[in-house]
Amino acid sequence: MSKHNANHQLENIGAHALANFFVNFTLSKEQIEQFILMLEMSPEEDSLVEEIQQEISHIQQSLQDVGLEKIEPLTVSLNSLLQQIKLKHLQFETVLSDLILLAINDIKVVMEKIIDGENRCVLVNRLPRICESIDAIGTSNERSRSGTIKDALLLLDPSIEIIETSISRSDSLINLFSKEMPNEEELAAYGVEESDDFIFFRALSEPLESRANYWSGRSHRMLRLALKMNDQAGRPVNPNQLAAAVYMHDAGMALLPLEIINSKEKFTLEQLEQIQKHPVVGYELMRYMKTWREASFIVLQHHEKVDGSGYPYGLSDNDICDGAKILSIVDAVDARTHERAYATLLKRPLLRAAIELGQKAGTQFNEKWVNVFKDVFQEMRKVSE
């Protein structure tokens, strides 16, 4: 679609119609996300499939209303795929959730690019192939289905090629997500020295993690990924300081009342205020240890967001240290790939984590470090092939 045609089309649509489109699209998208999460818990529930189909049909109608039928075939292919699931010709699996969510997000991306008046949108050019690949999933046999789904995902977003849809014990990625304590040799490879202080921080993390079952082993998992990302970027952060911060970053969370830590209900404003103070508590525990000043600031800032909407101080991108930027991504990845009481009760695959990080790059997460995260998996995947 040329810039002239796009602008002409938008002039015909009008600002009010476009605003209505995005309002309706956002509502449908949120409903789809909710129904998909419910479907993952109850994959045999046909009514949930029907609800998703209905919301996709609403998006299809909205595209027609603003005269963008060119994007409409994607909604048709998605609903055909869901029909195959409903008819039991295709077994629902989590990776199909990821495909649907990614496709819906791409519709929004295309609309935004058209509104921005960009000369060309690669997604629109790929649209016929994307639809063909989604249609092929329903007719593929069990042997080839995994590859067919992967082809569709790569067409939707080539950058996710780096991410496997699940972690198996035979996958070389498993080491990055092991909850076993890294040994001295492994730490030394990332530039970490096992000083008395470091051993103390690590020992302290174990009873802190015992406050909640779903925290077990998370510090070791997070440490490996944080150090790997730092290594990938040329070690801009002192590895010792980063490692200490990983072990101490949620010390303040562990000191909260158990009813908050293990709550599955929506937090009250008072509880949220307590939670948002936990980085300050961790910082205060370390600030008087002069050797670990850098680590204390990583702990203090690891819940800040690059757009300034984080806590505890609402810092923006340039004011947040690199160590905190790494730690915020690592914390999010662990939350999305392991069960957490105050997040989803589902165990999200890495693909979902990659999609969400990509969507929040430049708002919640620093774009450079999101790309480093992706590079880590690119490298690991080459090793496994």
Image (spheres, helix red, strand yellow):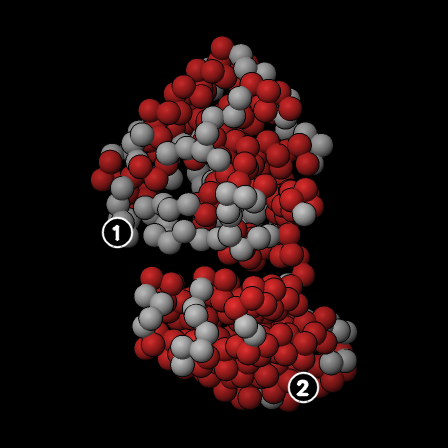
The x, y position of residue 363, in whole percent, is: 56, 52
Q: Amino acid at mark 2?
A: Gln
Which residue is the site of mark 2? 9
Q: Are marks 2 and 1 in contact (CB under 8 Å)?
A: no
Q: Is residue 324 left or right of residue 161?
A: left
Q: Which quadrant of the figure contains the N terminus?
A: bottom right
* Mark 1: few/some/many CA within 10 Å (<14, 14-19, 20+): few
Which residue is at the far left? 259
Q: Secondary structure at mark 1?
A: loop
Closest to the observer, 202 or 30: 202
The x, y position of residue 14, in whole percent, is: 59, 85
Q: Nearer the viewer, mark 2 or mark 1?
A: 1
Q: Is residue 185 visible?
A: yes
Which residue is the site of mark 1? 265
Q: Is residue 21 visible?
A: no
Quadrant of the rendered structure where residue 226 is? top right
* Mark 2: few/some/many CA within 10 Å (<14, 14-19, 20+): some
The x, y position of residue 265, in whole percent, is: 26, 51
Closest to the observer, 111 or 151: 151
Q: Secondary structure at mark 2?
A: helix
In the image, what residue occupies the spot 46% across and 29% down?
A: 180
In the image, what residue occupies the spot 47% across and 26% down?
A: 181
Closest to the observer, 42 or 341: 42
